[in-house]
Image (tube, grey):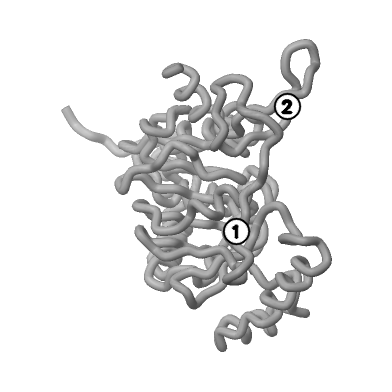
Amino acid sequence: MTNDPPTTVAALAAEHGRREAYAYLDEDTKRNVRRAVLKALAIPGWQVPFASREMPVARGWGSGGLQVTLSLVGPGDTVKVIDQGDDMSVNAAGMRRLISTSAQCAATTCTTDATIVQSRHRIPEVELRPDQLLVLQVPHPEPLRRVVPDDLAALACHAEGDYTPAWLDLYDAQARLGGPRTGADHPVLVAGTRLMSPSPIPRHDVLRLDRRPHPVLLGAGRRARLTALPPYTSVQPLAFDDVALEPEEAGAPCWRCGSTTSYRVPTEGPEAALVWCCSDVDACRKREATT
């Protein structure tokens, strides 16, 4: 039996696609992203540029995290994608289908079964293991974008380790508003030296970033930047010694599982009543099953 090469144009195109566009991206693009990931892991919290490509999602809606996941996923991986804690939103379901179909890998909605967890706006409340990878989508990777005039000035601040503008903005928010100016995307100090934007996760999750046992990769497709946190990296929210960063307060325990410690959001419950429920659907489901 001979193994003749494909002779038709369609067969040649299909064979070329299997070699060069596995998991949607071509091999050169994936190599570029993987090099950027290695550099980012070597310098925790540093913004590493990469050649961001056009993706079948709008920039600012997860194209950076999607490129990171597609560059690292393999046939043996199991992928979970969540959007603000929900596995079944349009954004999460579409990305999960794209990743699993193009990479021919398994997909799941169970956090403990996944090898790669890609998330928008949340860190899973089920604690991840050292052999799992968390990929966060970041629309704005520059933590100084609100307080410095341009990118060159921000780069100079990072190079000199001078984050005075960020400290002044934090003081102004404390004096005028009594707390942080934004409800999410609070800047953090990585290894006590570099200021990093942790993606628009709530303050509840910002406080959970410190010394996680697994790698965290943050991709910003629109700004073509990657940031990474190796395992057990010190990550502290930007805060004054006498005014610690406080997590958000929920109005009531979760009406499904009864949790009082999870990150909860208001939603419409039975008979159109306003209730509070866990943002992380999988964690809520697991707690509900044990009660």
* Residue occupying the point 60% across, 62% down: 244
Question: Between residues 128 and 237, which one lies in front from this camera angle?
Answer: 237
From this view, report whether residue 233 is shown above or below residue 68: below
Question: Between residues 109 and 210, which one lies in front from this camera angle?
Answer: 210
3D distance between C-alphas at marks 2 and 1? 29 Å
Q: Are marks 2 and 1 in contact (CB under 8 Å)?
A: no
- For badge 2, the amino acid type reads Thr
Residue 97, percent across and down? 53, 31
Dot 2 or dot 1: first in sequence order is 1
* Residue occupying the point 52% across, 37% down: 81
From this view, report whether residue 265 is shown above or below residue 39: above
Instruction: Describe the element under mark 2 as helix, strand or loop.
Output: strand
- For badge 1, the amino acid type reads Ala
76 with respect to 109 (left or right): left
Q: Quadrant of the N terminus?
A: top left
Residue 110, percent across and down? 43, 28
Task: Please give the label number shown on residue 285.
Answer: none
Question: Between residues 273 and 128, which one lies in front from this camera angle?
Answer: 273
Residue 1 visible (yes or no):
yes
> What residue does disc 2 label?
267
Residue 165, percent across and down? 70, 79
From this view, report whether residue 58 is shown above or below residue 138: above
Q: Determine which quarter of the picture holds residue 108.
A: top left
Instruction: Describe the element under mark 1 as helix, strand or loop.
Output: strand
